[in-house]
Each structure stands twice: as structure tokens, then as C-alpha cells.
Image (cartoon, rainbow, N blue to C red):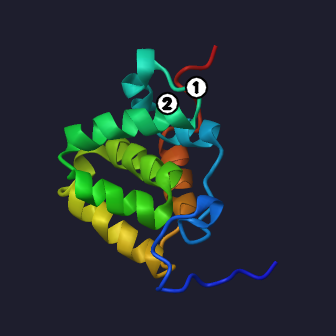
């Protein structure tokens, strides 16, 4: 499968090609890596990507990430991936001094093909012992 490099001209997000070919991960894996985001879902739970994206908007504001930084992340990596990164930032808590600056940096690195969410998610899964908080 040959991956096409996005041309700098097309700034309009068009369906699945938005996010520069960055694939989103299974929602279950995201929630396993980032269980804290569950508290911010509608009714305290997250059952689908729309719930995760709603929770990410609340958390974005809580973390002090500007709307423009989040919009750029959604445009640059796709809304599912931007929500996933917000969940990761929440999970890492006090380890990130400037969540907005960090998100902007990851967005720029994504656009240059230098950032992948997978390793970040897997590190959090390992850090959380690989067990789900809501098991049972």
C-alpha cells in the first residue's frame, strides 16, 4: 500500500484523508490507556468516539488549552486523534507544564510525519498496568 504525501495546497479536511494518514486507534485501547477521560464523558462514561470528542472539549478547557490550539490539532491530526492526545495529556497530569504548547508541538510534528500516537498510548497502557478501571 503506497502512502501519498499530502500536498501543502489542500488545507481542507476531506473525510478519512484528514489527519495526514494518521490512523486512529480502537476506542477501547484509548480508554484503557487513558481511563481518567471516562469521568468527563456524557453521564460519566464513553461509549463511542463522539462521547470521547465531547469529553476532550471539556478537558481541553480544563487544561487551559486554547480553542485555536485544539482546532489546529483537529485539522492536523483528525478529530479522533486530537481527542486521543487530549486524553493522553490528561492522563499524564502534572508531567506536562504547558498542555496547549505541547498540543501545538505535537500537531506540528504530526504534520511533518514525526509523531505517532501509538507509542504514547502503549506507554500509558503499560503505566496503568494494562488493566481497565471499568472492568466488570
Which residue in the rendered view is the most extreme toward the right? 1
**Cα distance in 3D space between marks 1 and 2:** 6 Å
The circle on residue 47 is: 1
> Which x, y percent locates residue 29?
61, 42
Residue 97 sits in quarter:
bottom left
**Relative vertical location of residue 25 with respect to residue 131 in this rendering, above or below:** below
> Which x, y percent locates residue 125?
54, 44
Residue at 56%, 72% in the rendered image:
20
116 or 92: nearer the eye?
A: 116
> Which x, y percent locates residue 102?
28, 63
The circle on residue 51 is: 2
Task: Name the element at disc 1.
Answer: loop
Residue at 50%, 58% in the rendered image:
78
Residue at 54%, 47% in the rendered image:
126
Please give the count of numbered marks on the rendered protein.
2
**Relative vertical location of residue 85 with respect to residue 102 in this rendering, above or below:** above
Crowding around mark 2 (Cα neighbors within 10 Å: few <14, some 14 to 19, many 20+) is: some
> Which x, y percent locates residue 21?
62, 69
Q: Is residue 96 visible?
A: no
108 or 90: nearer the eye?
A: 108
Residue at 45%, 74% in the rendered image:
11
Amino acid at each position: 500500500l503506497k502512502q501519498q504525501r499530502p500536498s501543502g495546497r489542500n488545507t481542507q479536511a476531506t473525510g478519512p484523508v484528514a489527519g495526514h494518514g494518521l490512523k486512529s486507534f480502537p476506542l477501547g485501547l484509548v480508554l484503557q490507556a487513558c481511563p481518567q477521560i471516562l469521568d468527563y464523558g456524557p453521564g460519566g462514561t464513553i461509549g463511542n468516539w463522539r462521547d470521547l470528542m465531547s469529553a476532550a472539549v471539556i478537558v481541553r478547557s480544563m487544561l487551559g488549552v486554547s480553542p485555536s490550539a485544539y482546532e489546529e490539532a483537529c485539522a492536523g491530526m483528525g478529530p479522533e486523534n486530537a481527542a486521543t492526545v487530549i486524553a493522553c495529556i490528561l492522563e499524564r497530569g502534572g508531567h506536562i507544564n504547558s498542555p496547549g504548547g505541547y498540543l501545538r508541538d505535537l500537531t506540528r510534528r504530526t504534520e511533518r510525519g514525526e509523531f505517532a500516537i501509538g507509542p504514547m498510548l502503549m506507554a500509558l497502557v503499560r503505566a496503568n498496568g494494562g488493566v481497565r478501571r471499568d472492568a466488570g
